[in-house]
Each structure stands twice: as C-alpha cells, then as structure tokens.
Amino acid sequence: MPKFETRHKVRHAAADMFALVADVEAYPKFVPLCEALKVRGRQSRPDGSSVLIADMTVSYKVFRETFTSRVTLIPAENRILVEYLDGPFRQMENRWTFTPLTEKSCEVGFFIAYEFKSRTLGALMGAVFERAFHKFAGAFESRADEVYGV
C-alpha cells in the first residue's frame, strides 16, 4: 500500500495551522487536485472535538473521482484524523499533527496511506497522487503565509 509521510517546520503557530487544515471548505482554492469539497454534516462533541463528513472531488485531466471521509478535529491535541468511508479507494488513512516549537512556529506532520480499489486506476493515478502529496505541505504553508502573513 503506498504511503507518504512528511514533517515540516513552518513559521506559524500550531493553532493557526490546525485551523487552516480544519477549514476543509477552502481546499478547492489551494489544494493540489482538489476540484470541490462539500461538508455533508458536522457534529460537535462535549470534549471540544468535532466530526464532519465530507465529500472531496479530485480531478486530473480526464480522471475525476469523489470520495467521502470522516474528519475528526481534535484541537486540544492539535490533531486531525481522516477516515475513508466511500469512493475509489480500497482503504485510506490520513493524519495531521501540529507540534508547537515556539509561540509563532510549529512542526506540521502529514501522513497518508492509500490503496485504490482498481489496479488500473492505481497504476494510472499512483504517480500523480504521489507528486500531489509532495506538494501538499508547500500548498498549506503558502496558504498560511497568505492568510496569516509571513
């Protein structure tokens, strides 16, 4: 199963980076391959976390697929967990962590493991997804610079 993991230091507070990644509705503006994102539902929990169900449409040339995920936002732990529910994958797991380094900087951790249901689709899109994941950290950091300043 393909996996990608990175840790990257950024000049933004952990809470700011958490908020930026948690704002999934903004993804079509800056996330590679993300054409559309719709939140179907959102539920707040007593512990301060929240869970949302979201449909994300990714597209590249003639390829266009929508998949559904459960996103758990845990601000007290600076963590975001994404669980795959439906779509072109056999399975997918995604985690974000935001570790404070100073008041105005943090380390962003990103992990994803995925497997397409179709071998053909996996062979066709595997390299494209791999390149996109390598661009994710840069896309979020650039968005943070735009939203929060440098």
Image (cartoon, rainbow, N blue to C red):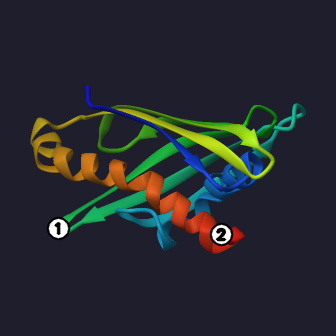
Residue at (38%, 62%) from the top-left corner? Answer: 32
Residue at (70%, 49%) from the top-left corner? Answer: 105
Residue 114 figure quarter: top left
Task: Name the residue carrying label 1.
Answer: 62
Whole-percent x, y for residue 47 in the image: 87, 31
Report the number of discs: 2
Q: Quadrant of the C terminus?
A: bottom right
Q: What element carries label 2?
A: loop
Q: Which amino acid does label 1 sit on?
A: Val
Q: In which quarter of the image is the N terminus?
A: top left
Residue at (29%, 64%) from the top-left corner? Answer: 59
Q: Is mark 1 on a helix, strand or loop?
A: loop
Q: Which amino acid does label 2 sit on?
A: Val
Front one among 59 and 43? 59
Front one among 60 and 4? 4
Task: Name the residue carrying label 2.
Answer: 150
